[in-house]
Image: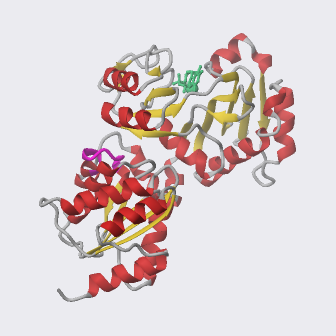
């Protein structure tokens, strides 16, 4: 789905609007309340043409956002290609950008030549097949020789040939380069940006994302396997969805140290650090970006609900996630009588780190400075006889 495609876009350096994934009106409301401005509420379904099907709304206030979320969740979006429709179960809330123009860029495999073909048009926001019929000259194609790769000058030539507005030129080679990296690295059948927006302030941003992965490519990135399911496949995934996370955000493993981190990369790094310190993670829980105290609390409860867990390491790198919210969530979780408490190690860096540390200190906790130190302590705790 779009939010997953955009996660991959970010991995390869393609700019996307800032935002958050949400499953409930409450989450949408809380996020907009915290980040006042104009937001787009986008239904996360497999089908395209969501705009025309009524699956995309614009909200200027938290209350509006909540109302649209309520309207969209559970709604069945339909169009001609999808007469049965698809039920909306999750949303992406994204900063609304002021559009100067909309372009289209994709890479797919050309059946005839078996080579990757890049397709670019200045007619973004429309179905590319329609453009091919109504205005074939507006479409530029370029066949890539995989042995040679894709060069920035080729991207520039494509932009000229497709008559993209001048504002695209600077960013375009990097974006197409990222798209090609994604296509090859993940063994995709299709990577598509429609529209690729030039904003009024001159930025070039992928406003929509479509990534179709090939089964054969998935072995390289097993963490993406779960993306293919359309509903939780097991108890752990269901538990993650239950507390408002994505279903691939929580996975149980064999060890005895509970891990909560934000972002898959940091999570993997944390598990490695634990292994190097001589321990083994009991799970991996990615609280994602922008987590609020309540989600931190629920995550703590979920992880300690696993009886294998003997110690816990919470490792947060604050970007849109704020250290004070994480700290509040931890303190709240430890107050509850309904949670099992285990020795806890916390590392907080980045946004509102100082505030977070103060909250933890007031509750008698002392966060560690580095990931390695945190991993070492967590392993000591897990090995200590109780
Ligand atoms: P699709 O209809 O499923 O392909 O969904 P898109 O993400 O492509 O959105 C459809 C249309 O909504 C876009 O072509 C835009 O015209 C409009 N739209 C989406 N995001 C924004 C935004 O941030 N600002 C503005 N002004 N329009 C947007
Ligand atoms: Mn689109």
In what quadrant of the picture does the C terminus appear?
bottom left
Where's residue 130, x and y in %?
64, 15
Residue 308 visible in the current orientation: yes
Relative to 129, say whether 378 is above or below: below
Using the rendered view, name the quadrant where residue 173 is placed.
top right
Q: Is residue 292 left or right of residue 373?
A: left
Where's residue 368, x and y in %?
43, 75
Label tally:
0
Q: How is the image coloured?
A: secondary structure
Q: 171 and 331: which one is in front?
A: 331
Using the rendered view, name the quadrant where residue 333 is placed.
bottom left
Q: Is residue 304 left or right of residue 116?
A: left
Q: Is residue 96 left or right of residue 249?
A: right
Residue 245 belongs to the span the image colors magenta: yes
**Residue farthest left in this picture:** 337
Tell me the residue at 56%/47% (across/down).
8
Q: Is residue 268 left or right of residue 119?
A: left
Q: 283 and 65: which one is in front?
A: 65
Relative to 270, say whether 227 is above or below: above
Q: Which stretch appears magenta?
A: 240-247
Using the rendered view, name the quadrant where residue 14 is placed.
top right
**Residue farthest bottom in this picture:** 385
Residue 2 belongs to the span the image colors magenta: no
Tell me the residue at 28%/81% (across/down).
382
Tell me the residue at 42%/40% (across/down).
21
Where's residue 273, x and y in %?
46, 77
Residue 111 visible in the current orientation: no
């Amino acid at each position: 789905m779009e939010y997953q495609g955009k996660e991959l876009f970010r991995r390869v350096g393609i700019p996307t609007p800032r935002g958050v994934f949400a499953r409930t009106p409450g989450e949408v409301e809380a996020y907009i309340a915290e980040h006042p401005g104009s937001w787009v509420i986008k239904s996360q379904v497999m089908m395209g043409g969501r705009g025309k099907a009524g699956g995309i709304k614009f909200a200027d206030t938290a209350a509006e956002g909540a109302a649209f979320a309520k309207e969209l969740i559970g709604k069945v979006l339909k169009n001609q290609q999808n007469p049965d429709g698809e039920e909306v179960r999750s949303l992406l809330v994204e900063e609304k950008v002021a559009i100067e123009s909309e372009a289209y860029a994709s890479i797919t495999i050309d059946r005839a030549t078996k080579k990757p073909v890049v397709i670019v048009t200045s007619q973004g926001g429309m179905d590319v097949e329609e453009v091919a019929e109504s205005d074939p000259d507006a479409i530029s194609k370029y066949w890539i020789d995989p042995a040679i790769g894709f060069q920035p000058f080729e991207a520039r030539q494509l932009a000229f040939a497709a008559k993209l507005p001048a504002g695209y030129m600077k960013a375009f080679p990097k974006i197409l380069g990222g798209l090609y990296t994604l296509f090859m690295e993940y063994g995709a059948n299709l990577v598509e940006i429609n529209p690729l927006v030039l904003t009024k302030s001159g930025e070039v941003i992928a406003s929509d994302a479509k990534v179709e992965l090939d089964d054969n490519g998935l072995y390289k990135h097993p963490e993406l396997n779960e993306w293919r399911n359309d509903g939780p496949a097991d108890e752990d995934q269901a538990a993650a969805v239950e507390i408002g996370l994505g279903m691939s955000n929580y996975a149980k493993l064999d060890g005895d140290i509970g891990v909560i981190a934000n972002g898959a990369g940091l999570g993997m790094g944390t598990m490695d650090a634990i292994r190097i310190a001589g321990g083994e993670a009991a799970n991996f829980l990615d609280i994602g970006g922008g987590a609020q105290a309540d989600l931190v609390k629920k995550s703590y409860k979920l992880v300690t609900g696993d009886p294998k867990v003997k110690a816990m390491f919470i490792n947060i790198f604050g970007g849109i996630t704020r250290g004070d919210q994480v700290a509040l969530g931890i303190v709240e979780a430890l107050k509850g009588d309904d949670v099992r408490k285990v020795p806890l190690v916390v590392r907080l860096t980045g946004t509102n780190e100082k505030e977070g540390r103060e909250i933890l200190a007031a509750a008698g906790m002392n966060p560690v400075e580095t990931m390695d130190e945190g991993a070492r302590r967590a392993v000591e705790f897990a090995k200590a006889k109780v």
